[in-house]
Amino acid sequence: MKSVYYNGKVITLEGDDCSAFAVEDGKFAKVGSDEELLGERDISETVNLEGKTVLPAFFETHIHILSLGMLLKDINHNDCDSIENLIEISRDYIEKIIFLQANG
């Protein structure tokens, strides 16, 4: 089952000048001109994009990777059940690092 979307402005990561794309089994199969894709065989559906723009997918990549790395490297006192336990965990940690930053 192939759908062809045509008469649009299809932006590709390669910078090609395309006006149409084909979808097969729910995935982009091909991009190109209206003439090229409307001439394909086995088209089950055509959709006129009426000049609309189609962009590549965007994903939210706003992560604070440095902060996560620092947090994972920090000592965690959340499981300490006594002052002695806190001191023991801290001493073991201090032997491995230059400075101490703790949470919890």
Image (tube, rainbow, N blue to C red):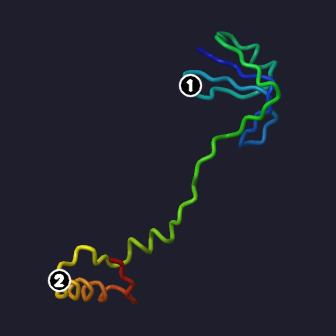
Tell me the element at label 1: loop
47 or 36: nearer the viewer: 47
Residue at which label 2 appears: 82
Q: Could you classify mark 1 by the number of other residues whose Cα lies within 10 Å: few (under 14), some (14-19), or many (20 or more)?
A: few
Residue 104 vertical position relative to residue 2 in the rendered view, above or below: below
Q: Nearer the viewer, mark 2 or mark 1?
A: 2
Which residue shows up at 33% across the image and 79% down it? 75
Which residue shows up at 67% across the image and 12% down it? 43
Find residue 56 and report its horizontal and vertical position in percent. Answer: 67, 40
Which residue shows up at 76% across the image and 15% down it? 38
Residue 50 vertical position relative to residue 64 in the rendered view, above or below: above
Tell me the element at label 2: loop
Query: Image quadrant for the N terminus?
Result: top right
Q: Quadrant of residue 11?
A: top right
CA separation in Å, label 2 and label 1: 57 Å
Label 2 or label 1, whichever comes before in sequence order: 1
Find residue 44 and report its horizontal and vertical position in percent. Answer: 64, 11
Find residue 66 and report its horizontal and vertical position in percent. Answer: 51, 71
Find residue 26 and report its horizontal and vertical position in percent. Answer: 56, 25
Residue at which label 1 appears: 26
Which residue shows up at 79% across the image and 37% down it? 16
Residue 68 vertical position relative to residue 37 in the rendered view, above or below: below
Q: Amino acid at mark 1?
A: Gly
Q: Could you classify mark 2 by the number of other residues whose Cα lies within 10 Å: few (under 14), some (14-19), or many (20 or more)?
A: few
Please state if 46 lies on the left or on the right of 88 as rendered.
Answer: right
Residue 87 vertical position relative to residue 7 in the rendered view, above or below: below
